[in-house]
């Protein structure tokens, strides 16, 4: 999953739509008065299995409202943002910051030891500003900046400064709309500086400064959002692989330090982490290491509740999605550019289900296992929309592929979220073709089976399936071609349906057809 640098670039999309035709049907008038945003439509019209998305904060409140409305309409209740990079040095983004006729990096009577730059999409409140006259909100050249000292005391002679540039209050807009729609936002924590030459590792020479700045940001969040149900916690933006980590792993050390700040500043708030997995032979690691990785990450929570949303790896091509009977099959055509025209077993240690199942074995108390299904393809094909800047190119995936990712997550995930809303769920190949969000809105009633087990009921042998949109209808069992009417249905975190059937042979393919007449886009294979 691409990281926190998204605040420094523009997404360039072949075409962007805010999902207006199929997602939100005609209803009360949405005509806006001059100078006002269109009234909110808080209906959920297509509740899909994915219930959260990474989003980009928008400075325009009306654009934010349309985006949140579209996401809410397809059943989501959670939004996640990346934290901007806490960059070492004075970046060009703050070069125009001038206060009292001086560059903001100069403070009369103080020695400035280190400058940091923070480029964000939010406007802070008084909770960020501690030292009168030194810590300031600055309007300069038509833009808004902040200057923040990290010194232990405002009276210290030597100060480290953070210069902040913002393009508007995108995060505030997001919080406002999320609260109105009954949704939650996990703002990204400030992302650690990266090690020169090893950008996958944090630069621990600045971890102390990062912690001090994180505490200031969170104090401001506590003051501005602490009373809102739309603020359940924060997102850890620095990525790591969910594998066995060394005793002195630099990213685990970063997590432990920054999460301790979160636990102290925001008692009871949840920390969301989204580690990646890599099943490629020769480059990745086997599924059993995900179990150790889960335990290592969970140990950094400093007593705070934590959700670990494992990136499923299909979007980047690092982990495949295939059925239990397909290990020797040729890899999907979209994965060939990454691993070649070989079989799944030759290219990968396992599939997404193998890794999520392993992680589920080591979920401690106070931690929830979520899954982040990557809503894109590793590369683009001709005529396909997606992300064209920054590199690498990423293509738009399909509703069928997304269903299979949800299926692969199995019954283990407490919640399924996805990276990322723009551009992958909103882009269109042409103006008259649907977006992925439109396809979800049209096909959301299709069943998805995530688990199947043999289970006796009332003395009869049968099959119990779990998943989404299973109520009513039939279960078809292949290769026998047997269609059996459902005789029991239940609903808890997942839906369940049971039908009497005794499988024959090593593999049984199951297709559910529900009371709406919809069938799963891909059958579930039971061994």
Image (cartoon, grey):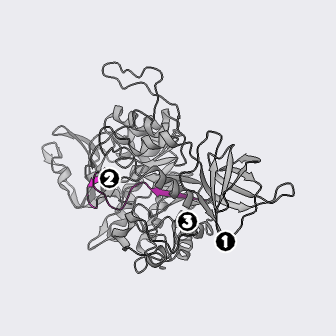
Along the line of sight, the residue nearer the viewer: 436 or 515: 515
Q: Residue at x 36, y 52 (%)?
A: 396
Name the spot of residue 175 as percent of width and height, x first.
44, 39
The residue carrying mark 1 is 506
Mark on residue 170? none
Along the line of sight, the residue nearer the viewer: 44 or 236: 44
Q: Which dot, 3 or 2, sits closer to the camera?
A: 3
Name the spot of residue 267 as percent of width and height, x first.
55, 52
The residue carrying mark 2 is 154
Whole-angstrom CA distance, mark 1 to mark 3, is 13 Å
Along the line of sight, the residue nearer the viewer: 178 or 168: 178
Using a 10 Å C-alpha cutoff, classify the residue at mark 1 as few (fewer than 14 neighbours), some (14 to 19) or many (20 or more). few
Name the spot of residue 107 as percent of width and height, x first.
20, 52
Whole-angstrom CA distance, mark 2 to mark 1, is 72 Å
* N-terminal-most mark, 1 or 3: 3
* Total numbered circles: 3
87 in the magenta segment: no
């Amino acid at each position: 999953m691409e990281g926190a640098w998204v605040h420094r670039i523009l997404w360039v999309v072949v075409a962007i739509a805010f999902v207006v035709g199929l997602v939100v049907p005609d209803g009360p008038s949405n005509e806006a008065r001059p100078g006002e945003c269109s009234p909110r439509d808080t209906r959920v019209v297509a509740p899909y299995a994915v219930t959260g998305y990474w989003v980009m904060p928008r400075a325009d409140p009306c654009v934010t409202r349309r985006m949140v409305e579209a996401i809410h309409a397809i059943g989501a209740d959670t939004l996640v943002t990346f934290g901007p990079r806490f960059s070492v040095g004075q970046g060009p983004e703050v070069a125009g910051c001038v206060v009292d006729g001086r560059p903001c990096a100069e403070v009369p009577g103080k020695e400035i030891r280190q400058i940091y730059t923070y480029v964000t999409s939010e406007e802070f409140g008084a909770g960020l500003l501690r030292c009168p006259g030194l810590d300031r909100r600055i309007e300069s050249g038509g833009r808004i900046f902040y200057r923040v000292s990290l010194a232990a005391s405002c009276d210290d002679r030597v100060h480290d400064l953070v210069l902040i540039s913002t393009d508007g209050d995108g995060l505030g807009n997001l919080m406002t709309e999320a609260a109105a729609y009954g949704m939650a936002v996990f703002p990204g924590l400030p992302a650690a500086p990266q090690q020169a030459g090893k950008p996958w590792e944090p630069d621990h020479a600045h971890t102390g400064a990062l912690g001090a700045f994180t505490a200031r940001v969170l104090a401001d969040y506590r003051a501005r959002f602490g009373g809102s149900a739309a603020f359940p916690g924060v997102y850890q933006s620095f990525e790591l692989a969910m594998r066995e980590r060394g005793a002195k792993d630099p990213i685990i050390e970063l997590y432990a330090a920054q999460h301790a700040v979160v636990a102290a500043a925001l008692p009871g708030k949840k920390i969301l982490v989204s580690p990646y997995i890599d099943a490629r032979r020769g480059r990745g690691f086997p599924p059993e290491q995900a179990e150790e990785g889960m335990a290592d990450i969970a140990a950094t929570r400093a007593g705070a509740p934590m959700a670990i949303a494992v990136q499923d790896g299909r979007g980047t091509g690092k982990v495949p999605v295939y059925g239990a009977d397909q290990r020797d099959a040729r890899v999907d055509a979209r994965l060939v550019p990454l691993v070649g025209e070989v079989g799944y077993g030759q290219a990968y240690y396992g599939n997404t289900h193998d890794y999520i199942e392993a992680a589920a074995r080591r979920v401690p108390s106070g931690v929830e296992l979520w899954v982040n299904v990557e809503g894109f393809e590793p590369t683009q094909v001709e005529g396909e929309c997606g992300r064209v800047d920054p590199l690498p190119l990423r293509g738009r995936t399909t509703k069928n592929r997304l269903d299979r990712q949800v299926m692969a997550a199995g019954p283990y995930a407490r919640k399924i979220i996805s990276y990322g809303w723009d551009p992958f769920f909103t882009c269109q190949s042409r103006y008259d073709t649907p977006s992925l969000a439109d396809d979800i809105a049209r096909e959301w009633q299709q069943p998805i089976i995530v688990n199947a087990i043999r289970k006796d009921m009332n003395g009869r042998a049968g099959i119990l399936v779990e998943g989404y949109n299973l109520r009513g209808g039939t279960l078809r069992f292949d290769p026998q071609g047997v269609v059996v009417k459902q005789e029991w249905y239940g609903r808890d975190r997942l839906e369940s349906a049971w039908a009497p059937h005794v499988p024959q042979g090593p593999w049984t393919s199951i297709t559910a057809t529900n009371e709406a007449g919809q069938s799963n886009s891909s059958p579930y294979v039971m061994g």
